[in-house]
Amino acid sequence: MTVIVSGAGIGGLTVALTCHQLGIPVKVFEAVPKISPLGVGINLQPHAVRELFELGLADQLDAIAVRTREVAYFSKHGLPIWTEDRGKWAGYHWPQYSVHRGELQMMLLNAVTARLGPDCVETGSIVMGFESTDNGVVVSVAQAGSTRQFKGRVLIAADGIHSNIRAGFHPNEGPPVWGGAVLWRGTTRAKAFLSGTSMAMAGHRDLKFVTYPISQPDENGLSLINWIADIKLDKITHWNHNIYNRKGELADFLPKFESWNFDWLDIPDLIRNADAIYEFPMIDRDPLARWTVDNVTLLGDAAHAMYPIGSNGASQAIIDARVLGKYFKSLGINGAALQAYDDERRPICNAVVLANRGDGPDHILQVVEERCQGRFDKIEDILSPKEMAKMAADYKKIAGFDVKTLNNAPDILGANDDSNT
């Protein structure tokens, strides 16, 4: 009956907590020797927050994250284009959160350890391959220089964009796809801007800055501010697009943003005062025609690695885990449940991958840039409120968090409604 999970990231840990909620034995193997709170800021959309609340994690989320009040779009000259409420301010029954990715992972890991025991997650353990049998799967795990075999009912590959299991399914796929953009990401201790819990995006497709607070203000009124400097390069440009999480250099990107000192935020100052800066190529993977083979399936980035646009990567992994749990509950722990999950989630996630390649909801910035190079007296002369609202609404429908649809949707696992939390 045991569910074996490869990867103790956000998706894999949510699978473990969901299995525990359903009374299903689960074992998680993680490649790194020790799980540490690495990464920078991410956002959790209300449809994913709903599921974490159903797992009893509302208080823990509020302790480590910021409830995002609004998202605000600006031109490259700092002129306001469009602002929309988020989370409960937008009418959802659940908040949207901005949070440090590492803090979220550690929160989930602590919940797994507390509920399933310290032996549920084995670190320093790399899932190298598997063999499907008539009644389950035998998984090969490399540990401390040797390889051991573990038997389970199904294998869930939540082992990220460089998934060993995905590579086994699709040996000719090659490396992730680089679209030509590079992200410099950092965090800076500073005063929050606009509402104090706003997410702001300025610029356009080729040159964009995204920022939001990921902690509550300290005794000096300073929050940890997450920021992303996004520059689109010519795809023939030599760049380290196969190297992930490399230390960033100011000279490579700060000159592009030197003039971006706006009345609502001094962007060059925010960049210069960063605690640390990391460089990431903006990469994803092409959508697949299948995630599941017999008693094995893909989940999270292993299934649908996507550009960090629209605040959806972690959210979609959480939804994956919960939909998988729904089918475990209704169909049992077997290949049929995996295929039902595949059939439901794959078309949705593939559509999000493709929408993010088209800039997702951030496309509004590019439209303004193309129509007026980011300068205007009244935004209504450039882009009507109806057009702007439609861009935002269309993406929410694609990604599965349209307000009315989500608020009226039944719980994925049929649990009690926690909408008043």
Image (tube, rainbow, N blue to C red):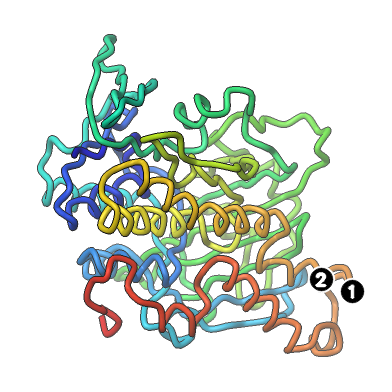
Q: Nearer the viewer, residue 362 or 224?
A: 362
In the depicted structure, whether residue 135 falls above or below residue 77: above
Residue hosting label 1: 371
Q: Residues within 10 Å of mark 1 (few under 14, many from 20)?
A: few
Residue contact at pointers 1 and 2, CB within 8 angstroms: yes
In the depicted structure, whether residue 298 falls above or below residue 375: above
Query: Could you say where residue 231 lies in the image, as x and y percent from the top left?
Result: 72, 49
Residue drawn at 76 percent across, 83 percent down: 387
Q: Which residue appears farthest toward the top when viewing the image?
A: 146
**Quarter of the C terminus within the rendering:** bottom left
* Res. 96 image quadrant: bottom left
Residue 268: give its label.
none
* Res. 215 image quadrant: bottom left
Query: Could you say where residue 264 lies in the image, as x and y percent from the top left?
Result: 61, 77
Residue drawn at 43 percent across, 46 percent down: 339
* Res. 48 image quadrant: bottom left
Report the amino acid beneath label 2.
Answer: Val
Q: Which residue appears farthest toward the front when viewing the image?
A: 134
Query: Could you say where residue 4 lies in the image, as x and y percent from the top left?
Result: 27, 35
In the depicted structure, whether residue 413 falls above or below residue 21: below
Left or right of residue 164: residue 5: left
Q: Secondary structure at mark 1?
A: helix
Residue drawn at 18 percent across, 57 percent down: 21
Residue hosting label 2: 367
Q: Secondary structure at mark 2?
A: helix
